[in-house]
Image (spheres, rainbow, N blue to C red):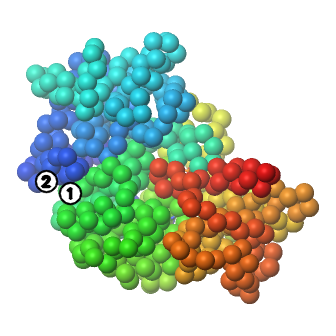
């Protein structure tokens, strides 16, 4: 394991304070609504921190922020960091059931909501039913009688300085971050100040970021990808950020040109949609320097196109919420092949191993589950002791549920999720391998391979394919394309064509939902 050079005694507040002191008047954030400097956000977050203190919110209290990519999120983020409270970001698309789950599981004392989706009313009824620990609802960019708005908090806080709170970066949790819920109910990973600071610093180092960079933040701020390699990495580098509330391919292309974006983080689908947009060539994307592509398997073809057609020297990273998120990342000094086909090597301060079903290390190069230990690993899942015990063993190894191979040089290749492996008549099929080949097909935009129950073989495989507009393909033509390229048993038993694949807001294909739908379709 490479030692980390990051100062381990620094809190998130310290990172922000440092950037603010160096560049008070530098533009820090543009969210399509306001342009604000580091000083503006510093003043806002101090006021919010003071207001929290006056309202009885303090160290260890959980505060939910159910906000889109708006600048207010930053003021809340750094206010919470200052007073040692715990930020619980929440997916803005959540509805009653999901929101109630997060409120109950986190035991939050306060919540920020926006007007959309009737979240205010959901939260109010939770408060009235006395089933939650919620005491306060704060409204953002709208007003409700009897409740403080974000603007009210700024006013309340202006009269008094915020309290000075001592923080132990190693021990104190900064955020309970819920996983995407791709494989089950979202779990709240407890991440410390150190987890955040270290991971952001490693991102800055890997991407060689500095104060001249402009980060595009179109991944949601409520996801770990937005929280750490976007927001905190930008602050670590004293850079500027551009928030976009929604992903729309053409709007992104336009924003890159307009704001001269240098760092474009995203999930594979975002890049796929940008590259396939009919107006792609009419925008000037020459400011793009690099960015991280992660969160889901990145087809090699797509990685190559981002480099060649977008001119963006993209970096691949692998991680998960539980690991703050970065575990491995490719380096600018790696060869092009390594930088398209692997997710790189571990960041400093982190070690990995690959294990079999009995958690014994497998020989180099063999497929197994990736386990991680080090400065990026969460303290555990909040309020889920059993899940924590399953995930982290007594020696501090976190088992990721992802299947990988590790080569002699330490490069990791993602094979797929353990839960997505298909066992067809006794043979293992790893969906990713087949998806990679289908991504090379000129008429394929997106594809997902899933398993379906079968009375004879146990499971069979099915490809759900989204074709280019106007393209004509058949089940037979798709199967023929794969013939000779892979073993027969890996050729999907069924191919269905879909208009859209169901996605999570963090940009992953919802394979469980897709599987359910295809099962139902095939029964009828
Ligand atoms: P849940 O844990 O609730 O089922 P989730 O695992 O999708 O949801 P996240 O923490 O957002 O929640 O995602 C982490 C997962 O995303 C990893 O475990 C891995 O499966 C996948 N992933 C992340 N980066 C990559 C990558 N570069 N290549 C392939 N898969 C990736
Ligand atoms: Mg997960």
Mark number for residue 17? Answer: none
Q: Residue at x 32, y 46 (%)?
A: 69
Neighbours of disc 1 within 10 Å: few (<14), some (14-19), many (20+): many
Image position, residue 146 (x, y; %): 28, 14
Work out whether mark 2 precedes mark 1 in sequence or the reverse, and give the earlier one. 2
Q: Residue furthest right?
A: 456
From the viewer's perspective, is residue 13 above or below residue 232?
A: above
Q: Which residue is mark 2?
A: 27
Taking depth in this image into account, of 470 and 12 the one nearest to the observer is 470
Find numbered disc 1 in the image and state the secondary structure of the residue it sits on.
strand
Report if the CB atoms under discs 2 and 1 are less than 8 Å apart.
Answer: yes
Look at 24% across and 43% down and name the residue there.
Answer: 71
On the image, numbered disc 1 is attached to which residue?
Answer: 240
For this rendering, which residue is in front, 11 or 233? 233
Say what secondary structure mark 2 lies in. strand
- Measured as percent of width and height from the top left, residue 40 is found at 13, 42
Q: Residue at 34% of width from left, 31% of height from top?
A: 115
Q: CA distance from mark 2 to mark 1?
A: 6 Å
Residue 48, quarter of the rendered image: top left
């Amino acid at each position: 394991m490479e030692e980390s050079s990051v100062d381990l005694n620094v809190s998130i507040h310290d990172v922000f304070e440092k950037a603010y002191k160096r560049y008070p008047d530098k533009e820090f954030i543009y969210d399509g609504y306001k342009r604000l400097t580091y000083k503006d956000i510093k003043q806002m977050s101090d006021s919010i921190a003071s207001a929290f203190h006056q309202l009885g919110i303090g160290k260890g209290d959980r505060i939910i922020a159910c906000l889109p990519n708006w600048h207010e999120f930053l003021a809340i983020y750094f206010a919470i960091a200052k007073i040692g409270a715990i930020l619980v970001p929440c997916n803005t698309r959540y509805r009653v059931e999901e929101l109630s789950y997060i409120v109950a599981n986190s035991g939050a004392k306060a919540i920020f909501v926006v007007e959309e989706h009737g979240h205010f009313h959901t939260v109010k009824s939770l408060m009235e039913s006395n089933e939650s620990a919620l005491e306060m609802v704060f409204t953002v960019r709208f007003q409700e009688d009897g409740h403080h708005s974000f603007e009210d908090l700024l006013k309340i806080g202006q009269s008094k300085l915020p309290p000075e709170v001592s923080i132990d970066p190693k021990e104190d949790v900064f955020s309970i971050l819920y996983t995407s819920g791709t494989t089950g109910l979202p779990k709240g990973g407890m991440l410390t100040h150190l987890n955040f600071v270290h991971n952001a610093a490693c991102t800055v180092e890997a991407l060689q970021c500095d104060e001249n960079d402009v980060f595009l933040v179109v991944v949601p701020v409520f996801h770990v990808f937005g929280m750490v390699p976007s927001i905190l990495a930008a602050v670590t580098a004293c850079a500027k950020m551009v928030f976009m509330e929604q992903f729309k391919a053409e709007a992104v292309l336009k924003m890159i040109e307009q704001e001269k974006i240098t760092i474009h983080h995203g999930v594979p689908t975002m890049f796929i949609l940008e590259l396939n947009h009919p107006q792609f060539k009419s925008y000037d994307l020459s400011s793009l320097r690099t960015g991280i592509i992660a969160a889901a398997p990145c087809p090699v073809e797509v990685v190559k196109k981002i480099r060649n057609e977008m001119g963006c020297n993209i970096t691949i990273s692998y991680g998960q919420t539980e690991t703050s998120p970065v575990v491995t990342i490719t380096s600018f000094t790696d060869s092009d092949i390594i930088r398209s086909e692997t997710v790189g090597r571990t960041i400093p301060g982190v070690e990995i191993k690959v294990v079999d079903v009995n958690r014994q290390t497998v020989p180099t190069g063999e497929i197994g589950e990736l386990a991680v230990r080090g400065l990026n690993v969460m303290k555990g899942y909040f309020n889920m002791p059993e899940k924590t015990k399953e995930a982290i063993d007594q020696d501090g190894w976190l088992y990721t549920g992802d299947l990988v191979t590790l080569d002699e040089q330490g490069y990791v290749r993602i094979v797929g999720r353990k839960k997505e492996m298909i066992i067809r008549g006794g043979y293992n099929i790893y969906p990713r391998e087949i998806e990679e080949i289908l991504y090379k097909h000129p008429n394929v935009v997106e594809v997902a391979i899933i398993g379906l129950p079968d009375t004879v073989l146990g499971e069979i495989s099915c490809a759900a394919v989204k074709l280019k507009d106007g393209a004509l393909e058949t089940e037979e033509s798709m199967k023929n394309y794969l013939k000779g390229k892979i073993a027969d048993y890996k050729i999907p038993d069924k191919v269905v064509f879909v208009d859209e694949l169901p996605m999570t807001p963090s940009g992953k294909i919802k394979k469980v939902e897709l599987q359910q739908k295809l099962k139902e379709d095939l029964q009828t």
